[in-house]
Amino acid sequence: GWNFFAPWAAWDPHKVVALNNVDLTVASGEYLMITGANGSGKSSLLNIIAGSIRPDTGSVHVGEQDITRWAEHERGRLIARVFQKPDTGTVPDLTVLENFRLASLRTKHKTLRTGITPAFRQRVRDVLTPLGMGLENKITQAAGTLSGGQRQALTLAMAVMDDASLLLMDE
């Protein structure tokens, strides 16, 4: 599970308070859907959990691990994310296979041996085939040539291909 707590900071007339006194715990295996009006802080909450925004106060934990001071790329070992816009989660000039390779490095130690092997190609095909979109036949195609829906499916498949402790999905 993970826990997020951010007590209210001192009032400042020039500061926008996106989240105020949030205390949220989600147990392992549970899911949570947050709804609200535009500007209510939903994306801000996801950005704080993911590390895109640093909270002024409070802490973020994944399991027993305090990740509050971890950089966003360090949190990628524990947190997978699907963005609202399909093009945010992929690199358009890279092939589908190269995008998967980049995503798989999120949870691995980086070495010179982290290339695209026949086993990795098959693993990507195995992840894409159940989607029923024919993406397993487009792994050498640039991701930017796919439709928005195909890119969104690709982003979701990349997010869940490796074990993550937490999956964040924005709309």
Image (tube, rainbow, N blue to C red):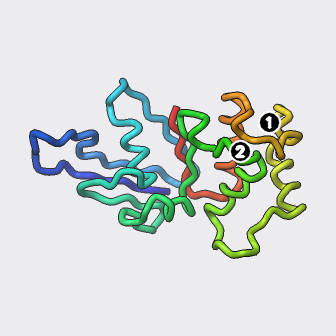
Residue ranking furthest to the front? 93
Q: Secondary structure at mark 1?
A: helix
Tell me the tag on residue 140: none
Residue position marked by numbered label 2 in the rendering: 157
Q: Residue at x 36, y 25 (%)?
A: 38
Q: Secondary structure at mark 2?
A: helix
Q: Position of residue 153 (x, y in %)?
A: 70, 36
- Is 143 situated left or right of 123 in this image? left
Q: Residue at x 85, y 48 (%)?
A: 125
Neighbour tally class for label 1: few under 14, some 14-19, many 20 plus, Cα within 10 Å? some
- Is 76 situated left or right of 114 in this image? left
Neighbour tally class for label 2: few under 14, some 14-19, many 20 plus, Cα within 10 Å? some
Instruction: Quote the CA–CA distance across marks 2 and 1.
Output: 9 Å
Q: Position of residue 105 (x, y in %)?
A: 66, 63
Q: Position of residue 138 (x, y in %)?
A: 84, 40
Q: Nearer the viewer, residue 87 or 83?
A: 87
Q: Position of residue 160 (x, y in %)?
A: 67, 50
Which badge, 2 or 1, comes first in the chain's sequence? 1
**Circles 2, 1 touching at the beta carbon (< 8 Å):** yes
The kind of residue tagged 1 is: Leu
Q: Residue at x 17, y 42 (%)?
A: 15
Tell me the tag on residue 131: 1
The kind of residue tagged 2 is: Ala
Q: Specify the quadrant of the image occupied by residue 118.
A: bottom right
Q: Specify the quadrant of the image occupied by residue 78.
A: bottom right
Q: Height in image: 95 above or below 105?
A: above
